[in-house]
Amino acid sequence: MQASELSYFKEILENRKKQINSNIDGVNRELSQLNELELNDEGDHAAVNNNSMVESAIIIQQTQELHEIEVTLGKISYGDYGICEMCEDDIGFQRLKVKSHAIYCIDCREIVEKTQ
């Protein structure tokens, strides 16, 4: 992969990382606000619990993506970016444009999804 392409993807990944960190901070603030509410009845408790579960699921998903981005930024540093972890072929520019932190090419991703 050319240096300009690596720079392009590194910028995308770093911007996404900032966005995710901002999202996580926002969700944590919302959870704190939910915990500070004075709840008067079971309906209020149910609504807050439901919102807390949704917010927690968002944090889990965002944290996983953040971890994947960190791993991918490490791959860029070591020169391993854009190589499928299963077949070791190039992942492909178009796939990386869609998911910059992809670790599998399209074919291997389908195999992984079918086996899960």
Image (spheres, rainbow, N blue to C red):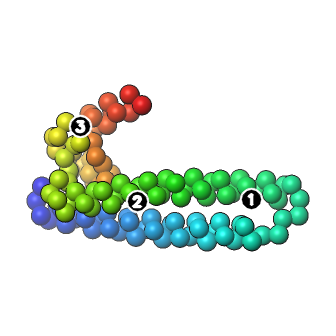
**Residue 92, placed above or below residue 48:** above
Give the alpha-carbon distance from disc 2 to disc 1, as whole Å.
26 Å
Residue 98 coordinates in the image, percent (x, y) = 32, 51
- At 38% from the left and 66% from the top, the residue drawn is 17
Three-letter residue code for mark 1: Val
> What residue is shown with label 3?
86
Residue 25 coordinates in the image, percent (x, y) = 53, 70
Around disc 3, counting alpha carbons within 10 Å, would you say few (fewer than 14), some (14 to 19), or many (20 or more)?
some
Tell me if I can see residue 98 in this picture. no
Which secondary structure lies at badge 1?
Answer: helix
Name which of mark 3 and mark 1 comes first in the sequence: 1
Which secondary structure lies at badge 3?
Answer: loop
- At 38% from the left and 33% from the top, the residue drawn is 113
Three-letter residue code for mark 2: Leu
Around disc 1, counting alpha carbons within 10 Å, would you say few (fewer than 14), some (14 to 19), or many (20 or more)?
some
> What residue is shown with label 1?
48
- At 19% from the left and 47% from the top, the residue drawn is 83
**Residue 104, placed above or below residue 25:** above
Residue 36 coordinates in the image, percent (x, y) = 74, 71
Contact (Cβ within 8 Å) of mark 2 with mark 1: no
Q: Nearer the viewer, residue 64 or 14?
A: 64
Which secondary structure lies at badge 2?
Answer: helix
The disc at residue 66 is 2
Residue 88 coordinates in the image, percent (x, y) = 17, 40
Name which of mark 3 and mark 2 comes first in the sequence: 2
- At 38% from the left and 57% from the top, the residue drawn is 67
**Residue 113, placed above or below residue 97:** above
Around disc 2, counting alpha carbons within 10 Å, would you say few (fewer than 14), some (14 to 19), or many (20 or more)?
many
Q: Which residue is outermost to the top?
A: 115
**Left or right: 37 as drawn, with respect to 19:** right
Name which of mark 2 and mark 1 comes first in the sequence: 1
